[in-house]
Image: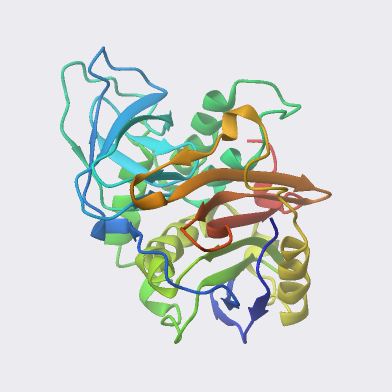
Amino acid sequence: MKVQQLHVGAGATVGPLSIFPVWTAAPGELGISTGTHADVAVSELASGAQVPRLTVTNNGPRPALLLEGELLEGGQQHRTCARDVLLGAGETRDIDTYCVEAGRWEAGQSSHRRQARRAPLNVWAELAAGSDDPRGSDRQGRIWNRVSRFDAVRGPSVTSSLLDHLDRFTQDRDDPFTASDAPAPLDGQRGVVIGLGSQPLLLEVFGTHTLFRRHYRQLIESALLDVELLPPKIRASRSMPAQLARDFAAAVQATDFGTFDGGLPELEVRHHRGGLRSRNVSRTAGPITAAGIAVELPHRKPELAHLTGWNTRHTLMEIA
């Protein structure tokens, strides 16, 4: 299973952030809800709250997609999705999460909310490393370290809360760049290549234009928070050349995830109502690591509903 043909358009800049639109040759209709349009409830586990697990329920009539790095707010502490999750209509499942609020464990607090906000790329990048990460198993500790970077540059949060930093950033009128400075989505656009400084960092692409639109603003808003973590030299660098964006997209496009029914045991195929099937995909090849989720609809070949590709050599990917 390979990535559909990607087409990269002309870029725009928001400070040191370079944003290039991406189109694909995929069919474009999946019947999936996502973002704030997905009626997904979040709760602590019925058997007792755990840091690395939450229960999610799709109360909507259509399959619902939650994204790796999507923030699940409230409860006993704020969490982020460990990987992409597709929930069938009416489906309830316990999912893997990581904490992004090291200083709070509020026993008995069960109220959650979903605003479909995204973790900044500095934090989300920690999820990009596969299960064979040579740095060891303490990914939760490294995520807390990455969140603490914002404490250092923006001032401390009482509970070292990533959400607190996001809230303050979006409300701070003195910040030089905002998501409203970013270009609006173009007709049929399904993704973006993002460069920080003069090098590509991330390519994110969705199976449909609607799925992309549901998450675009939140992605840019979170990525702008990362700007404050960059060394002054990178923050002052010129915009990323378009050829680097195209080369990066070509490298991600070359990723082969194997057969839909193959892969590692932890990436098993899931069956949903209406004949829909899904499975997580991931692959690392050289400096590119890619992960997402593929779906198979009746009478159609498997296709990607969501994919992110990372440049592991970018400064922001360095160990916290």
Residue 2: x %, y % from top left: 70, 59
**Quarter of the image holding residue 24?**
bottom right
Please identify the residue farthest to the top as the structure is shown. 47
**Quarter of the image holding residue 265?**
top right
Query: In front here: 279 or 109?
Result: 279
Residue 78: x %, y % from top left: 32, 34
Q: Split into 4 quadrants, where in the image is the N terminus?
A: bottom right
Q: Answer with left or right where residue 81 lies relative to residue 78.
A: right
Residue 158 appears in the rendering: no
Q: Is residue 86 above or below residue 101?
A: below
Q: Which residue is found at the position 67% from the left and 63% from the top?
A: 3
Q: Is residue 245 above or below residue 36?
A: below
Q: Which residue is found at the position 44% from the left and 48% from the top?
A: 119
Query: In front here: 263 or 148?
Result: 263
Q: Split into 4 quadrants, where in the image is the C terminus?
A: top right
Q: Answer with left or right where residue 94 lies relative to residue 189.
A: left
Q: Which residue is found at the position 50% from the left and 62% from the top?
A: 299
Q: Is residue 273 above or below residue 195?
A: above
Residue 224: x %, y % from top left: 47, 62
